Amino acid sequence: SGIEAQYNTVLEGVPGCRLIRVDVSGYRRLELEGTDPKPGRDMNLTLDSAVQRELERALAGQVGAGVVLDVRNGDVLALASAPTFDPNEMTPAPTRARWAAIQRDPGDILFNRAVQGRYPPGSTFKVIVALAAMSEGLFSSADTYLCNGVYDLNPRPIRCSHNAQHGEVDLRQALQVSCNGYFCQTAAHIGAEPIRRMAQALGLGAVTGIDLPGEDAGLVPDEARKRAVYGDRWRLGDTCLMSIGQGDLLVSPLQMAVATAAIANGGRVLRPRIVQSEAQGGSVVRTVLWQPEQIAIVRQGMEDAVTHGTARQARGSAVAAAAKTGTAEYGTGARLKKYAWMIAYAPTENPTVALAIVIEDAADSGGTAAGPVVRRVLSVIFGEAAEKLP
């Protein structure tokens, strides 16, 4: 599976053969002809073994996935899905009983959540809404919204997390505290289409093109799909739910890592790669053109989220990081569950890495559940902050 399945024809080489004449007793009489075997090619991966090891350890015992990218060229520094399996169990083929147990495993251990998972991104999507809004002429990032803890939407109001009342907030502050009401109002003001366009420009709703099998394209919903699936038109409630990363919007951790890398590198949407290439700058799928002041506000909001906002759990590495949390709910009542998210990049000045982490069935918010994973990974890459050292 995975990289070995993707590059099997390159790795396996070509077997050789010999045609030998033997007599009735099996005695070799003559070697007639043959061909020499051709060895498979060695392949160098982009993975950083220390980062990969720490990401796997940080996800151990949980259900979720994570991706770490180099924002300069799209190199995959780490990619993990939990729970997972030991490939050595499959060579030779597992026993029938073990294979049956693997297929019954409730954690679906053969499923690569990092590239095949389809999750609502929750409030991590708000950075995309912010960029979409600033690309519209009628929106100003300086405009404020008075948050009293709930956005009045019929028939079901949308509340801020923990019923928080954020008061008067502008765009930068709304990213810091992850104000649902602000982004619902913003989405209602600009409409759904600019948000869809920005999401698609950053690679959502399409495969990233990574050199791994089975990648899922996710979903950026629109009115045509809603009519086809639900027999209903697109409504204001759909736009508001999409603006906070809920509804029918679905992404993979890999897609969110690519989008985060584009924010970190100034708009270059990269094709992620797991095998090293001679192309130093990586493969650029497209470049999203943002004004410097637009990307600066989003970055500042993400930096504020780490220093004194919802992403404080990401602090701890030797460099400053920027991040956005997300908590996507699904189910109802006693069966209500959460996907806990965090996207991040570091250092804040001249970023080199971007991360996306998701935890399934989390007991708490994205900051609490996914933040420690981000902190552990960044600490391996950059070292721990002085105040964390003994």
Image (cartoon, helix red, strand yellow):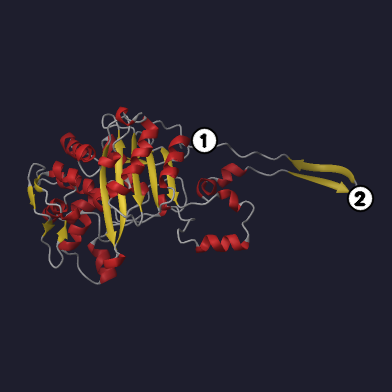
Q: Position of residue 285 (x, y in %)?
A: 34, 42
**Left or right: where does residue 204 sit relative to residue 135?**
right
Give amino acid for label 1.
Answer: Asn
Q: Residues within 10 Å of mark 1 (few under 14, many from 20)?
A: few
Q: Which mark, residue 112?
A: none
Residue at mark 1 to residue at mark 2: CA–CA distance = 47 Å
Q: Earlier in the sequence, mark 1 or mark 2?
A: 2
Q: Are marks 1 and 2 in contact (CB under 8 Å)?
A: no
- Residue under label 2, please give it: 23
Give amino acid for label 2.
Answer: Asp
**Left or right: where does residue 77 sit relative to residue 225?**
right
Q: Position of residue 327 (x, y in %)?
A: 27, 53
- Residue under label 1, please give it: 44
Please indicate, yes or no, whether residue 69 appears anywhere in the rendered image.
Answer: yes
Residue nearest the observer in this picture, 336 or 127:
336
**Residue 339 quadrant:** bottom left
Image height of 204 relative to 305, above or below = below
